[in-house]
Image (tube, rainbow, N blue to C red):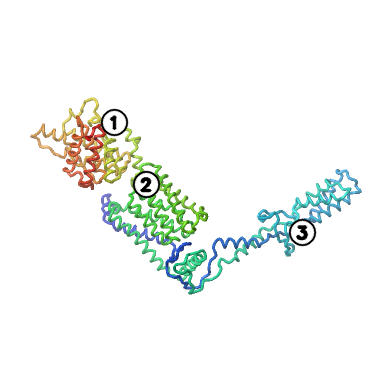
Amino acid sequence: MATLSPSRQKALLRKYARNVKFLMMIVSIFLIVYALPKQAKFSYEIEKGRIWNQKDLVSPYNFAILKTQQEIEGDKRTALASITPIYQLNEEIAPQQTEGFKTDLEIKWHNAGINDGQKERYILAGIGLLKDVYDKGVLNLNKKYQQSDINYPITILSNNIATDKNTAELYTKEKALTYCDQALSRRTGLNKAFLLDLLQNRIQSNLVYDDKLTSRLEKEVLEGLSVTHGMVQKGEVIVAKGSVVNDDVFQKLASYKKAFEDNARVNGDYRLVLLGQSLLVAIAITLLMVFLYLFRKDIYADNRLVSLILLVITAMLFTLSMAIRLQYNLYYIPYCIVPIIIRILFDTRLALNIHLLVVLIAGFFVPNSFEFAYFEITAGMVSIYSIKNLIRREQFLISAAIITFTYFVAYVGVSLIREGSFVDIDWVNFIPFVVSVSLTLLAYPLIWAFEKIFAITSDITLIELANTNNPLLREMAFTAPGTFQHSLQVANLAENAIYSIGGNALLVRAGALYHDIGKMENPLFFIENQSSGFNPHDKLPYEESAQIIIRHVSKGIEMAQKANLPQIVIDFIQTHHGDTRVDYFYQSYLKNFPEKIINENTFRYPGPVPFSKEAGVLMLADSVEAASRSLKEPDEKSISNLVDRIIKYKLDQNQLKDSNITLKDIETIKTIFKRMLMSIYHVRMDY
């Protein structure tokens, strides 16, 4: 069977890219709609303490008013209090222990040193005391029922005959021994200690707590409780326009919502509900694609990136749907993880756009959707703003703290609107928000996983690459120290310029640090590494010297690929000279060999020209910094002329035509370069 070549495969992927995109959209919509709860949406928002601004709400049918959870709990407590614990009378205990007493007395009598004539009297006394104790009843108290008093009412079952008693009327083993002690104290001529020693081993509980029967009775009484009180009749006004939604009205509205959803589940058309959900989700996903097409065509054209975005959205909405179905608290879900991931991997606008779409879709299916949307939109916006420029890892923790504070302020505000009092705020309900923020920190490992799976370079990776302790940079600092210092200066120039005109400062810094790593192959052939005055180019033909200089680009790409640097950083190595000539050697060749015909491409870099704003700024910074080293007496005028000349040359050579840099940006870049170079060379400005 024939196999397609890699080039043919890429051609097919390009040809059918749009079809693949549409397929991914359809799959995403299907998965989201599949997970969503299939029931009609109640069309009213219910909030206690608010004014009902809509028209009078009239009941379309009869429905029962549900009790509040507090009322149900109160009914349960009352019902359980009416159930007395069941104790079974074990009638075999008394005769068994009486016979045991007789046996014990026979065994211990001979060692007691008591006259044998008294034996019958001791037996009768012991049997009488045991009879009194067991006739009254002995039991172990159950701490479960000792709520307000040590004693509590019980029901004693004997031969299926129930008798109500109070434990105060019965004996515990300790009370029974106390009774025996007092009774023996009133009798003379008996060895009390001897008898008490025998009796204490023969006093056992003959009333045994029946947990199984008691629990069954409690279960039956709880199952028999009503969860409703009263009815709302068809045609009755549930709430009038302009009235306050107090506790009673709120409970009627909540009961109406439950009745509506139950009725819709039974009588509603499942297919129409499915159609409605599909339309809502499809609109949101389509809006996202339109946004990408209009404002981020680079992402729209890359199905790999589109698939990542759809995966994140689908996963979040799928998680939300599962939580709704399982009736979990929805605020445990880390909604802010989506804008954080998208912000780190892409940009702020896209992160905000996607977060709004996710919350809008979720708002149709969660209770108190306006309140939910307010919490999550504000928290999502804060999460995006708090990591606008990610330059340190601890910004994740700082962002988490700011998000938590935002949730807290919003929660207090909503609670005050509801309750009108600080005292009535239920602080326990804020715990889910704290858990949600904690789970948001999972964004860090998820970003790493997405980077590896989808071949994306995030700001976090750029931070790691920009660390000068990176092995490749350490090697350059040792092998080509002049080039290393040049790269640092270029990084500073480019980073400040891109900050001012707008762009990814982390990216341009990382690109600047690595753009000349190819010079490590032959460091002495580059003037910044020549400290002894010896120049190896003096002994080489101009063409060969030019090729050595040019080769640092291809060698740098090779070294970067071997070190697994991201392609986005390798692009800086490839484009930082564009397709310009190595003019020094080219002009020297023309001057010394005017009669020879030379192929200009021998002295020209292979390109391409920079195709991003960051790469264009790096090219300018690299050329300006390198040229500034040739100034013998740097002053304000010479530096200004140098910067103007270098940048004009790049423009004339069409090196910035694909970099999306405007003329206004060019003027800003010039100003920054001049100011920084004068600072580097300690030039005093006229003032």
Dot 2 alpha-carbon crowd within 10 angstroms: few under 14, some 14 to 19, many 20 or more? some
In the image shown, does 12 or 178 lie closer to the viewer? 178
State which mark lies toward you, 1 or 3. 1
Q: Residue at x 68, y 61 (%)?
A: 84
State which mark lies toward you, 1 or 2. 2
Helix, strand or loop status at disc 1: helix
CA–CA distance in space, label 1 to label 2: 34 Å
Helix, strand or loop status at disc 2: loop
Q: Residue at x 41, y 55 (%)?
A: 376
Amino acid of disc 3: Glu
Left or right side of 672 for 202: right
Residue picked out by circle 2? 387
In the image shown, does 550 or 146 lie closer to the viewer? 146
The percent position of residue 170, horizontal first and vertical second, equals 75, 56
Name which of mark 1 and mark 2 comes first in the sequence.
2
The percent position of residue 529, horizontal first and vertical second, equals 25, 30
Where is 625 relative to 318, above or below? Answer: above
Mark 1 and mark 3 residues within 8 Å of each other at the beta carbon: no
Left or right side of 127 for 329: left
Name which of mark 3 and mark 2 comes first in the sequence.
3
Residue occupying the far bottom of the picture: 235
Residue picked out by circle 1? 481
CA–CA distance in space, label 3 to label 2: 77 Å
Residue occupying the far top of the picture: 532
Residue picked out by circle 3? 91
